Image (tube, helix red, strand yellow):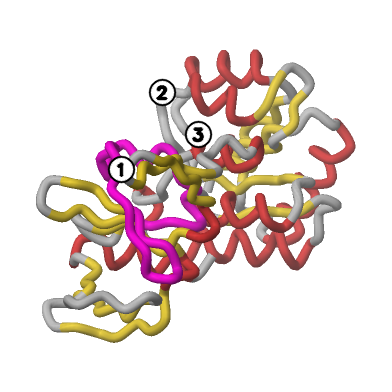
Amino acid sequence: MDVVIVEDERLSAEKLVRMINKFDPSIEVIATIDSVKKGVEWFKENSPPDLVLLDIQLSDGTGFDLLKEMDCSPPIIFTTAYDQYAIKAFKFNSVDYLLKPLDQSELEHALEKYKSLDKTERNAQNHSFGQVDQIINGEFKKRFLVKIGEQFQKVEVPQIAFFKYDDGLTYIYNLEGQKWPIDLSLDYLENMLHPLEFFRINRKMFISLNSIHQIHTYFNSRLLLKLKPEVDEEVIVSRDRVSDFKRWMDV
């Protein structure tokens, strides 16, 4: 297995190499890179490695800056000093993460996790790194302005249970069961809502984590959800979204 380390602190990079060798001497660290600029050059000139261990904060930018410039999408293990909430995003969008200061057992767990994935699973990593960047910077919708007759009212995002498309309109439902129409499509909402708090379960519904009351298996490998507030129809996670839904629930 070929590994590339992207880390701007020389001592941290050297420690990581020693930790990898201790775990499995057959793993070859083929490059250690200490900046975004050098990383861009390396990935343009070389075939992608099996795995990248990527620091978020680099001397001339962030790991996300490097990812945006890469033509390939190798599996990533993040190394980061960010807080636990942001780490959930790293976990959802990568093989795993290592929280600094680095720990031998956590590194070994991450590498074992990578080894346990088959080729299809490694290639299926979400890689929505732009969303991770958004999560860190808090760049998501915080409230919606809805019209009620001749008046306007604000609806805070934490109070939203789900969004539902019905009869050509998108409606906001709050946790108390009130609903209001909004002039936005579900496709558009996907870029506005926090991906760890909201999930699109099918073509017609975008639900919040707080709205989920029960999860049941359903025929044809789908899932049946019971929500708060209750909905007068079956709420189904479509078959093609079940795997991502489970990962979303398990971060």
Magenta-drawn stretch contains 197: yes
- Cα distance, mark 3 to mark 1? 26 Å
Helix, strand or loop status at disc 1: strand
Q: Quadrant of residue 108?
A: bottom right
Amino acid residing under circle 2:
Asp
Q: Residue at x 22, y 59 (%)?
A: 202
Residue at image mark 3: 130
Q: Earlier in the sequence, mark 3 or mark 1?
A: 3
Q: Earlier in the sequence, mark 2 or mark 3?
A: 2
Q: Is disc 3 surrounded by few (<14), some (14 to 19) or many (20+) residues within 10 Å?
A: few
Q: Quadrant of residue 198?
A: bottom left
- Cα distance, mark 2 to mark 3? 15 Å
Q: Which mark's residue is nearer the viewer, 3 or 1?
A: 1
Amino acid residing under circle 1:
Ile
Question: Along the line of sight, which residue is nearer the eye, 204 or 143?
Answer: 143
Magenta-drawn stretch contains 151: no
Q: Residue at x 35, y 47 (%)?
A: 148
- The disc at residue 182 is 1
Residue 109 visible to an observer of this rendering: yes
